[in-house]
Amino acid sequence: MSMNDPIASALSKIDTAVKRGKNQVVIYGHSQQLKTIFSLLQEHQYLGSFEEMIDRKGNYLIVNLLHGSLNKVGAIKPRYPVKVVELEKFEKRYLPSKDFGFLIVSTSKGMMTNAHARKAGLGGVLVAYCY
């Protein structure tokens, strides 16, 4: 049986593991898009390291969590297409306060945070939020 949304499933798994105080999470059914999201979270010091393990059943990711750095992470569904001028409206909707956390936007130049998309003058599709 296939998974409907591997990004939402992986982010939900990470959020649950953080709430339960776990150190690691094993994510099955990952993609390059999910690795890019994890690298953005790692770059902003919300996640520790992650590595891909190769198994005979299928590849999986082991994600190391940092304690006390991640409050909430989740996928944005439906994936809203946004223009640069509309980013602030969605920041108010998904983030608790200004300059606290970020949205992940899939643009024509790749995945980036809402701040980078605003500086580059790019719109895109909202994928996830993190704070």
Image: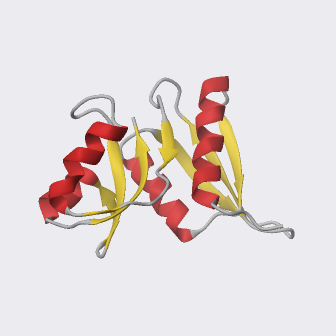
Residue lying at 27% horizontally and 38% vertically, measured from the top left: 92
64 vs 73, left or right, is right
Residue 101 in which image quadrant: top left
**Residue 100 location in percent, x, y?**
28, 32
Asked which quadrant contains residue 110, the reply is bottom left
Q: Relative to residue 35, is residue 50 depicted above or below? A: above
Residue pictured at 51% horizontal, 44% vertical? 74
Is residue 85 shown left or right of residue 127? left
Quarter of the image that includes the C terminus: top left
Residue pictured at 61% horizontal, 25% vertical: 19
- Give how far across and how far down residue 99 sits, in percent: 22, 34
Q: In which quarter of the image is the N terminus?
A: bottom right
Residue 121 drawn at (x, y percent): 14, 65
Colouring rule applied to residues: secondary structure
Q: Which quarter of the figure has residue 22?
A: top right
Image coordinates of residue 129 in percent, x first then y, are 41, 45
Given residues 92 and 34, the one toward you in this image is 92
Q: Is residue 36 left or right of residue 115?
A: right
Nearer to us in this view, 25 or 90: 90
Q: Looking at the image, can residue 21 be seen?
A: no
Q: Which residue is drawn at 36% across and 39% down?
A: 94
What count of labels does the image hold?
0
Depth check, front residue: 24 or 70: 70
**In the rendered image, the vertical position of residue 115 relative to residue 14, given as above or below:** below
Would residue 41 be seen by someone viewing this image from the given angle? yes
